Image (cartoon, rainbow, N blue to C red):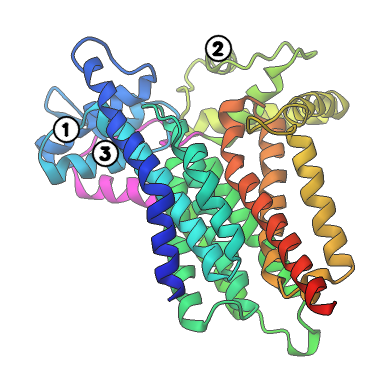
Amino acid sequence: MRALIFVVAALLLVTGQFHKAFDGAERYGYMADIMPAEWGATNLWLDSTECAVERGVWLAICDKGKLVPLSEYAIADDPGHALLLDLWAMAKQSRATLPDVARLNTLLDTLGLVALAGLLFALRAYLASLVLLWFGPVEYLGWMTTAPHWAFIGMVSLAGILPLAVAGRDLGLLSRRAGAWWIAAGVVFLALATLIREAIGLMGVAVTLGMVVLLALRRPWATRRLGGLALAVALAVAAFTTPKWVVLARDLSFDMQRAQIVPTHGLSHTLYLGLGFVENKWGIQYDDYYGQAVAAEIDPSIVFCSPEYFRLMWKLYLARWAEDPGEILRIYATKGWELLARPTMYPGPPFGVVLLIGLVHLLVASAFGLWGRIGFVQGALIETACVAFFGLFLAQAMAALPSHNYAMPVNAWVLVLWGVIAEFVARSLLRVRRAA
């Protein structure tokens, strides 16, 4: 009966906005014949789907009869969108279009919304789930483009499924069977999130690891059995390696030109150039071409975004830390404050206020044992996940850049936080009324 209630609520609250976004993708159809997509990698994804139809290969470009890895053209681009579009093109035996890209973003965001709300419902955080379903469609599906960034809010939602499922099963909030299914789904979702955006997959692994540590610490030493928790960490790490295995499977299946360029974003490149987002003593610039020029000056034989390039970026980044850690901390503080001082959701308070509310509420409610008193233990683990993702998005802003485009996906967890607090208040009032 609970599952039926959730399905009805999801259909009533999500379907309308989903159809609006999905059908609205047709507006990109007019661009197909007169101009390419604004996001350069999108055009390469579509070229890849043509090769997928002709040769049955994924993540490749057909260049004069040769199969060339897509990463040689779509430089420092995560493979998720291209892979899914290739599979879709092979299934329907026709090249993908710009409307297909927009529809894919819509589907990914809808999956993230419904999956996260569904897990909240399964954890019996009913009001939090309904708050997410009520306000989520506009935030998740209110606008859609053919760039990859508009799928990130859905992927951030999926990245949180595994840690919540592991905690829910460990605390007995999910049955053994339901917990196993949700954990399996969480592994698949984390793999998908990593394919779409490597940084988001890393967030999912970090939150899973943090949740496992908290669960381990709450167990008495005498009865501490960590096999299941260790398995959860291993599954998270395995899911994070999915892009590597997808590319390896392609290389083993087809006579492919050897790739020189890494088919993901590459963390060291972002960390080093991220120092150039604000004025700095080294003159570093947040510009891909700056990184390319620096590498060429040091060693002209280094190919941009090759493994050698990323190793060089690590050396340069660590060298800046060794040279002047105070300057780096100043840069990070400047970028962090830029995110904290403005809202990620409009209308809404600055992100720093949201983070403070979540952190203070979690600490106070936990310190006074309020979660257990009102019968809302699941609220503690959900709010812990919210605060963890807030901290990771702050870290991302400090390490890379604090632009709204990259911060906006955190709004999935902002909505969850408001839902948890609303349910906390409702359960507290209900308990007071019963006591009276």
Element on which disc 3 rests: helix
User: Which quadrant: the C terminus?
Assistant: bottom right
Q: Amino acid at mark 2?
A: Ala
Query: Is residue 165 shown above or below 341?
Result: below
First-in-chain label (2 vs 1): 1
First-in-chain label (2 vs 3): 3
Q: Amino acid at mark 1?
A: Cys
Total tally of numbered discs in the picture: 3
Queried whether the magenta region covers residue 435, the answer comes back as: no
Query: Dividing the picture into quarters, in which one does residue 327 lie?
Result: top right
Q: Is residue 292 visible?
A: yes
- Give the camera-side residue of 16 and 415: 16
Residue sitting at x 16%, y 29% = 66
Label 2 and label 1: CA atoms lie apart by 32 Å
Residue 214 at x, y percent in the picture: 74, 68
- Tag nearer the camera, 2 or 1: 1
The residue indicated by pointer 1 is 51
Query: Dividing the picture into quarters, in which one does residue 35 lie?
Result: top left
Element on which disc 2 rests: helix
Q: Which mark is residue 293?
A: 2
Task: Tell me which segment is drawn in magenta.
Answer: 243-265
Residue sitting at x 80%, y 84% = 221
Label 1 and label 3: CA atoms lie apart by 11 Å
- Tag nearer the camera, 2 or 3: 3
Queried whether the magenta region covers residue 246, the answer comes back as: yes
Residue 423 at x, y percent in the picture: 68, 61
The residue indicated by pointer 3 is 85
